[in-house]
């Protein structure tokens, strides 16, 4: 089985090192048509969120209690840089102002430390991919998956479920 080449040469963040094991593509995803695999990177450059990311974030929004939904929406609206690392096993969100990360003026969750907001499961072709949505300094910072999600990013035939939430936000 071949491994997918890394999209960027940047190292995985400390949070990304928590996952153990390989970051290979799911077997079913390796069989995606060449046209989909070839153009998925180009398509991602012309849209803010991939369909998979949009569905995960929509599921997260629905799972949040009503008072926390506007906070999440304001954070997502403010994001202007999305960094997809290591075959998209880690997807980081930033607000960049004047060349620096700056979340000033963007609402944040009550906990201003680092915490797991939710866990998600993506199932397609009998393969389940687990992902964690993590907040840092009260802002949604990343989606980390146990395997690369790039092959799933533009597929509409996968099932996505938010199955665990931080109890403070439900």
Image (tube, rainbow, N blue to C red):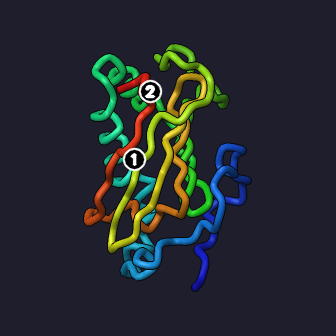
Q: Position of residue 16 (x, y in %)?
A: 65, 49
Direction from residue 74 to residue 136 in the image, left or right: right
State the mark number for residue 49.
Answer: 1
User: Which part of the image, by quadrant, shows the N terminus?
Assistant: bottom right
Front residue (pair 101, 166)? 166
Name the image quarter holding the C terminus.
Answer: top left
Nearer to us in this view, 126 or 104: 126
Q: CA distance from mark 1 to mark 2?
A: 14 Å
Q: Is residue 67 above or below residue 8?
A: above
Place of residue 62 in the rendered image (x, y in percent of width and height, measured from the top left): 27, 34
Q: Determine the secondary structure under disc 1.
A: loop
Percent position of residue 51, x then y:
33, 53
Quarter of the image where one finds residue 128: bottom left
Give the secondary structure at mark 2. helix
Q: Position of residue 136 (x, y in %)?
A: 59, 29
Q: Which residue appears at 57% of the width and 52% of the height?
A: 90
- In this orientation, which residue lies closer to the viewer: 150 or 95? 150
Location of residue 35 by image quarter: bottom left
Residue in view at x 40 percent, y 82 percent: 31
Q: Which mark is residue 70?
A: none
**Left or right of 123: which side holds 145?**
right
Q: Residue at x 60, y 66 (%)?
A: 23
Q: Earlier in the sequence, mark 1 or mark 2?
A: 1
What residue sits 36% from the left and 54% below the top?
Answer: 52
Query: Which residue position is annotated with label 2?
Result: 75
Direction from residue 131 to residue 58 in the image, left or right:
left
Label 1, residues with CA under 10 Å away: few <14, some 14-19, many ≥20:
some
């Amino acid at each position: 089985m071949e491994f997918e080449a890394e999209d960027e040469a940047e190292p995985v963040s400390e949070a990304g090192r928590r996952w153990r094991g390989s970051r290979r593509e799911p077997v079913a995803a390796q069989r995606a048509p060449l046209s989909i695999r070839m153009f998925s990177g180009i398509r991602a450059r012309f849209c803010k969120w991939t369909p998979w990311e949009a569905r995960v974030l929509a599921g997260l929004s629905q799972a949040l209690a009503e008072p926390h939904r506007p906070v999440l929406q304001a954070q997502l609206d403010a994001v202007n840089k999305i960094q997809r690392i290591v075959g998209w096993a880690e997807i980081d969100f930033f607000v960049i102002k004047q060349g620096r990360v700056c979340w000033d003026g963007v609402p944040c969750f009550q906990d201003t430390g680092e915490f797991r907001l939710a866990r998600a499961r993506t199932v397609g072709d009998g393969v389940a991919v687990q992902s964690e949505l993590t907040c840092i300094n009260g802002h949604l910072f990343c989606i980390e998956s146990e395997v690369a999600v790039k092959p799933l990013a533009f597929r509409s035939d996968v099932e996505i479920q938010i199955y665990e939430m931080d109890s403070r936000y439900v």
